[in-house]
Image (spheres, grey):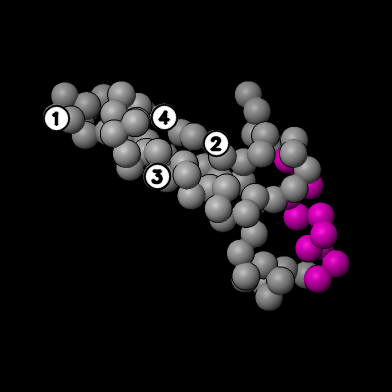
Amino acid sequence: VAKELGSRGVRVNAIAPGFFWTPLQPACWVKEKIPSLGADAAMARGAMPYELAPTFVFLASDDSSYVTGQVIHNNGGQVMG
């Protein structure tokens, strides 16, 4: 899609977050698993929402005017190729 729309000035990107904490996690997960959520990431923890927000702001800003066709893995190193 990025190739098809790039000439029209449309940028196509995605954000692939790893585990991040929200107020819903304690209500939705098994209590015993909560301490280990996000532990499989290289940073050995889940993210806080404020750590993800700047990625969205970057892609919405003019600072990313030459970024297209990318998937930004904001996941603390959980997925490393």
**Residue under pointer 1:** 8
Magenta residues (range): 31-41
Q: CA distance from mark 1 to mark 4?
A: 17 Å
Check the image and report above or below for 5 versus 31: above
Q: Is residue 39 left or right of residue 62?
A: right
N-term mark: 1 or 4: 1
N-term mark: 2 or 1: 1
Q: CA distance from mark 2 to mark 1?
A: 26 Å
Q: Residues within 10 Å of mark 3 (few under 14, many from 20)?
A: few
Q: Amino acid at mark 2?
A: His
N-term mark: 4 or 3: 3
Q: Amino acid at mark 4?
A: Gln
**Residue under pointer 2:** 73
- Give the secondary structure at mark 2: loop
Q: Are marks 1 and 4 in contact (CB under 8 Å)?
A: no
N-term mark: 3 or 1: 1
Please name the residue shown 34% across and 30% down the image.
64
Report x, y in % for residue 75: 62, 41
Check the image and report above or below for 69 versus 48: above
Report x, y in % for residue 28: 67, 72
Q: CA distance from mark 4 to mark 3?
A: 15 Å
Report x, y in % for residue 79: 65, 34
Q: Are marks 4 and 2 in contact (CB under 8 Å)?
A: no
- Give the secondary structure at mark 3: helix
Q: Which mark is residue 57?
A: 3
Q: CA distance from mark 3 to mark 1?
A: 22 Å
Q: Amino acid at mark 3?
A: Val
Q: Is residue 70 left or right of residue 74?
A: left
